[in-house]
Image (cartoon, rainbow, N blue to C red):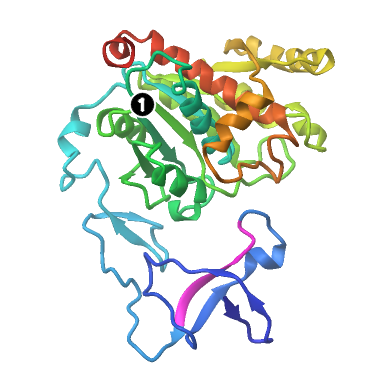
């Protein structure tokens, strides 16, 4: 907690990878922009730097990292990381020769909340007698730099790791803090396959999507670019559609314009787009009409039975923490989560059908 100059108390985030822990009485310079603007996910203060302490406080307490790749380049907060690709990395030789994802399924999502929902559903589907899997899936999480840059901001990533549900995390671009650091989306994907030996990769930005209410001015456009990258490397891009009948904004009703625009404009390569078969005829009709544009762009639509709310409740209960999107939980917007689970089911079908996986994933 910070006591501001006007005497008010506010919550603030302090990055322990940049500075030593603070003590009561320390004076700090805080970035208050997000609170001033009333932002959602990022609406807290951030400690920028200590100002007055009774002890020496180096700018970067841990010292320079072991690598030579800079993130947050040309800013006062730039930091060095050991990228998986660079020569000093133990993974350099593997990635130097890697060129293909070898048909690795990659779930691509726009919203960070899709991550825990997808992983929880996959755990449910591959356990409790619901699958013929011989071992747990190895799931890699790749965080883009389209939202928050520090992985540590993500409570979902931390919880999934603590539960042992992830084989590892990768941050690329200017995002940082993953088990592996990568320079770009291509090498991040290759690291998931050849370093973490993932059966499935899930790619989303961190918390804090940007939108402007314009056709192209939102950070989720990166999902279309990710489709192209996955196809270019010989992977199978499975696009998680953003579907909602709980969002009051017309542009996000049914199949969100973010999904339609990213796939219709940015995605040049073909994506697999699973869509849930909804029970309500009117909702299903709207979804089919909206999806017609994707067929014209030659994406592969796969209609999959929407899971029951009771099944999703059971799956999410194992996570033991709230999973919400835009402030709405499962009961507030069940079709949002049904779309995530349908996409996860489509990815699981690809894994089970893969000859490479049949030897150790299936009896």
Query: Where's residue 295, x and y in %?
Result: 64, 10
Left or right of residue 122: residue 255: right
Q: Is residue 20 above or below residue 106?
A: below
Query: Where's residue 246, x and y in %?
Result: 78, 34
Q: Which residues are magenta?
A: 42-50
Q: Secondary structure at mark 1?
A: loop
Query: Where's residue 141, x and y in %?
Result: 42, 37
Going 38% across and 34% down the picture, which residue do you hit?
A: 140
Going 48% across and 29% down the picture, which residue do you hit?
A: 226
Q: Nearer the viewer, residue 332 or 350?
A: 332
Residue 262 in sight in this render: no
Left or right of residue 25: residue 100: left
Going 41% across and 42% down the picture, which residue do you hit?
A: 163
Confirm whether the magenta stretch covers residue 47. yes
Quarter of the rendering containing residue 110:
top right
Q: Nearer the viewer, residue 273 or 268?
A: 273
Going 35% across and 81% down the picture, which residue do you hit?
A: 57
Instruction: Classify the position of the N terminus by image quarter.
Output: bottom right
Which residue is labeled 1 in the image? 136
């Amino acid at each position: 907690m910070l006591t501001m100059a006007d005497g008010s108390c506010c919550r603030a985030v302090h990055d322990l990878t940049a500075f030593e822990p603070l003590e009561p009485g320390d004076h700090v310079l805080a970035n208050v922009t997000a609170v001033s603007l009333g932002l959602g996910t990022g609406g807290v203060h951030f400690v920028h730097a200590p100002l007055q302490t009774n002890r020496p406080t180096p700018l970067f307490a841990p010292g320079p990292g072991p690598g030579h790749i800079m993130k947050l380049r040309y800013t006062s907060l730039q930091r060095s990381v050991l990228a998986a690709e660079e020569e000093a990395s133990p993974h350099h030789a593997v990635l130097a020769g890697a060129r293909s994802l070898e048909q690795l399924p990659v779930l691509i999502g726009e919203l960070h909340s899709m991550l825990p929902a997808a992983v929880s559903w996959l755990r449910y589907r591959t356990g409790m007698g619901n699958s013929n899997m011989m071992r747990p899936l190895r799931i890699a999480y790749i965080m883009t730099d389209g939202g928050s840059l520090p992985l540590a901001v993500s409570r979902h990533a931390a919880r999934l790791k603590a539960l042992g549900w992830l084989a590892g995390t990768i941050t690329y671009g200017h995002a940082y803090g993953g088990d592996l650091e990568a320079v770009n989306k291509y090498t991040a994907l290759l690291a998931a396959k050849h370093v973490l030996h993932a059966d499935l990769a899930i790619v989303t930005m961190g918390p804090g999507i940007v939108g402007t209410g314009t056709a192209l001015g939102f950070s989720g456009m990166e999902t279309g670019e990710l489709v192209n990258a996955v196809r270019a490397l010989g992977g199978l891009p499975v696009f998680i559609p953003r579907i909602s009948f709980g969002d009051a904004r017309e542009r996000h009703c049914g199949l969100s314009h973010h999904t339609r625009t990213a796939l219709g404009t940015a995605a040049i390569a073909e994506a697999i787009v699973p869509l849930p078969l909804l029970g309500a005829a009117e909702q299903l009709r709207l979804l089919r009409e909206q999806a017609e544009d994707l067929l014209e762009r030659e994406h592969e639509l796969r209609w999959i039975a929407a899971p029951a709310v009771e099944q999703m409740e059971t799956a999410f209960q194992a996570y033991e923490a709230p999973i919400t999107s835009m402030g709405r939980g499962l009961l507030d917007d069940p079709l949002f989560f049904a779309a995530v689970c349908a996409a996860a089911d489509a990815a699981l079908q690809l894994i089970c059908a893969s000859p490479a996986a049949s030897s150790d994933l299936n009896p």
